[in-house]
Amino acid sequence: MGISHTLWANPVDYLRATGPFDPVLFLSPAALQAQARRFLAGFPGLVTYAVKANPEEAVITNLATAGIAGFDVASPEEIALIRRLVPGATLHYNNPVRARHEIVFAVGHDVASYSVDSLGELEKLFAVVPQQRTGGEGVEITARFKLPVAGATYDFGTKFGATEALAAELLRRIAAAGYVPSLTFHPGTQCIDPAAWESYIRAAGRIAAAAGVRPARLNVGGGFPSHRVAGVVPALEAIFARIKAVTAEVFGTDAPALVCEPGRALVADAFAALARVKALRDAGNGAEGDGAAHVFLNDGIYGAFAELPLMGAMDRVAVFSPEGVARDGAPVPRVVFGPTCDSVDRMPGAVMLPGDIAEGDFVLVQGMGAYSVVTNTRFNGFGALGVQVVAALEP
Ligand SMILES: *Cc1c(COP(=O)(O)O)cnc(C)c1O
């Protein structure tokens, strides 16, 4: 990977000029900065970026340029990356399980906040983390709690998060030990329904009351939706308004300051993915599907489309000839495979593609910036994924 310094007008301009044989992700810095400003203007608190969604240097620097000054990091590697690219940034280390040497590394890099969901991990923090940062500000520890909530595409609660009773105990001990006591949760990912946040905020109120501790801040996690499916446009402002209203209702005038840590919703729609048609084959070799002709692409679930088996298909798709002319045949359902020899390497379901699609064509998928560059593999010798910068993502 690595980003070229040429700025292309749009993905079709690029494919026409270069006819790439390897898959490409296109970044629009303008779209990325606009989305960052939408969060900064709309979210009623501090906006931090969950680095794991896409740690490309151009992503980090463009977010910083747009005004994002806080980053949710999960490892020493991510801490070092942000300290190098945005030296003055505020770091929140919100992976609740850490080896002792990772905690020592974080302290050495002036991490401002740590999340925790177990008593054993809290004791590890107490043993290593001072109550004050190098500049004298208090170090924050957030108790991460979970709820059995429907609404996310998949459930994060099975791995991390304390029960309400344990979270209250953690919050009490954090305050008693002289750290800044706060609460956090992460509702899942691609949560379309504002209710996903509401039940957690109500639980935060119960936990604070049970602990007898006023949390300084409430971090409402990530999970904000991106524009995956053409007909489902994310209603971010409605989610922001619900978070603000429920926090005021639950905590009154003494409400904790709000923090969020979106990954997907900041980056996904700032990228488009380009894959090339290697082959078209007749149906009938027994692959699961609907008898549709099979399309083989040069990228799949071991590449930029890694998330699709978990998250479902995407339909913001256009097809172009090698000359850059949009295919406009009536859409036909296709079984779409990736390039590896693994039979799970296929897009979920049937993908509607123009009936006149041909070998050598390019398939452009919008909304591909999250969990794509960073989870790309070189399995079977594929995955030579390039990143190019464009002025606009649509031709
Ligand atoms: C992954 C993660 C995020 C970002 O999630 P998105 O769905 O990409 O917004 C935020 N916070 C935590 C703790 C995470 O693990």
Image: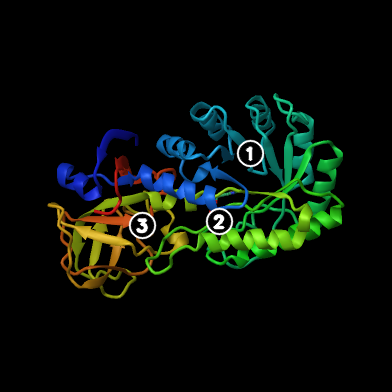
Q: Who's the residue at 79% across and 34% down the image?
A: 126
Mark 3 Cα shell of 10 Å, populated few (<14), some (14-19), many (≥20)? many
Say which amino acid is labelled 1: Tyr
- Kindly identify the residue that appears in the image at 25 percent across and 58 percent down: 296
- Residue 223 got which mark? 2
Q: Residue 291 carries which label?
A: none
Q: Mark 1 points at which residue?
A: 93
Task: Say which quadrant the N terminus sits in.
Answer: top left
Residue that numbered label 3 is attached to: 345
Residue 195 in the figure: left or right of residue 333: right
291 or 184, which lies in front? Answer: 184
Task: Please tell me which residue is depicted at 83% across the width and 42% down the height of the picture.
Answer: 175
Image quarter for residue 200? bottom right
User: Considering only order in the chain, which callout, 2 or 3, is on the residue closer to the N terminus?
Assistant: 2
Distance CA(mark 1)–CA(mark 3): 34 Å
**SS under mark 1:** strand
- Report the mark closest to the observer, 1 or 3: 1
Disc 2 residue: CB within 8 Å of ligand 1: yes
Q: Where is residue 170 in the image (x, y as percent from the top left)?
A: 80, 47
Can you tell which of label 3 and label 2 is closer to the viewer? 2
| Side of 21 relative to 386 (left or right) | left
